Amino acid sequence: MKMAACIDSATVAAFVDGTLDAPERTRVVAHLATCADCTELVAETVRTADELPAESVGGGTPGHAGRTEKVRYMRRPGLAAFGAVAAIAASIAFFVLSRPAVDPLVAILGNQRPILARPTGGFRAGPVASPVRAGGDEGANLQVAAEVAKRVEKASRTNDAEDLRAAGVAQLVARDVPGAIASLQAAAARNAGSAGIQADLGAALMTRFLALGDPADADRAMDALDKALTLHTSMPEAWFNKALLLEHLHRRDEALSAWSTYLELSDDNGWREEAIGHRDALRRQ
């Protein structure tokens, strides 16, 4: 049965872009479960929006505004004829479940940045805090420690790849680098086809390389990051870490190319500003 109030095009655009807050996203998903028209609209948009140039739908600019124009273009009579309900439901499920999740640790850490590498999960850019200064916020430290303990315990029970990854990321931002590497290697052993796991493993191995200088860790980190980018060619975190690693390996031209690729993909101003600083410093060398 269709609900009276369908989703407007701006909301659909924000849903597709992943910019809705959690309550609104929940409302949209609940509505889609009851409205075939909106379900088909969003499913078709998910399948085609990234393939449809913004200019072809009225000259929209890249980003949210251009995507809104695409949504308006897609909503036309006869859209329901495009596919079976099962296929539409599968498209919606794939979209919702594959959106990059914001790690709950982001809220705990705020603007604190404990390591130079960039894990997945929406962590914020900023100066890397020294271990001494990072110890100043005892409340945040206790929350991080509690989150690490919770995730490690869950991963030990389930032995699930994503639970191991979540534990590894928590250990990494808590600066337990050996524990992070162990968890993320275990996650990769269970799901070698996860770009996120490979990217986070690369970040952990790079962190150990930067601390201890073992070339073998640099090689392993690069291998994991390259695997991540083979699986997901436009993953910003993997490109950021690869560029950073190449820079520390004094492979200037490759690092410049990687920073340029990252800047083409990233829309996060904080991380972009840092990447521009790295790129410009390399250009001056």
Image: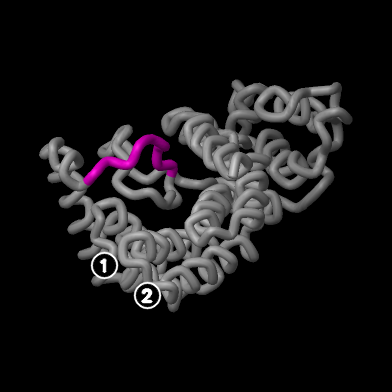
| Vertical comparison of 244 with 31: above or below | below
Q: Which mark is residue 186?
A: 2
At x 66%, y 54%, the residue is 253
For the point 32% across and 33% down, the residue is: 111
Which disc, if any, is residue 2? Answer: none
Nearest to the observer: residue 52 or residue 86 = 52
**Label 2 amino acid?**
Ala
Above-or-below relation of 183 to 278: below
Badge 2: how crowded within 10 Å, few (<14), some, or many (20+)?
many
- Which image quadrant is residue 195 in? bottom right
Q: Quadrant of the C terminus?
A: top right
Screen quadrant of the N terminus: top right
Q: Is the magenta region chiefly helix, strand or loop?
A: loop
How far from the left and from the top, in percent, is residue 274? 49, 37
| 65 relative position to 225: left or right | right
Residue 184 is situated, as x and y percent measured from the top left of the image, at 38, 68
Residue 5 location in percent, x, y? 60, 21
Q: CA distance from mark 2 to mark 1?
A: 11 Å
For discs 2 and 1, the disc positioned in front in the rendered view: 1
Asked if the stretch drawn in magenta spans residue 127, the answer is: yes
Residue 135 visible in the picture: yes
What residue is at 55 percent from the left and 40 percent from the top? 281
Front residue of 279/189: it is: 279
User: How many C-alpha atoms fall within 10 Å of the one at disc 1: few (<14), some, or many (≥20)?
Assistant: some
Per the image, the residue denoted by label 1 is 179
The magenta-colored residue range is: 122-130
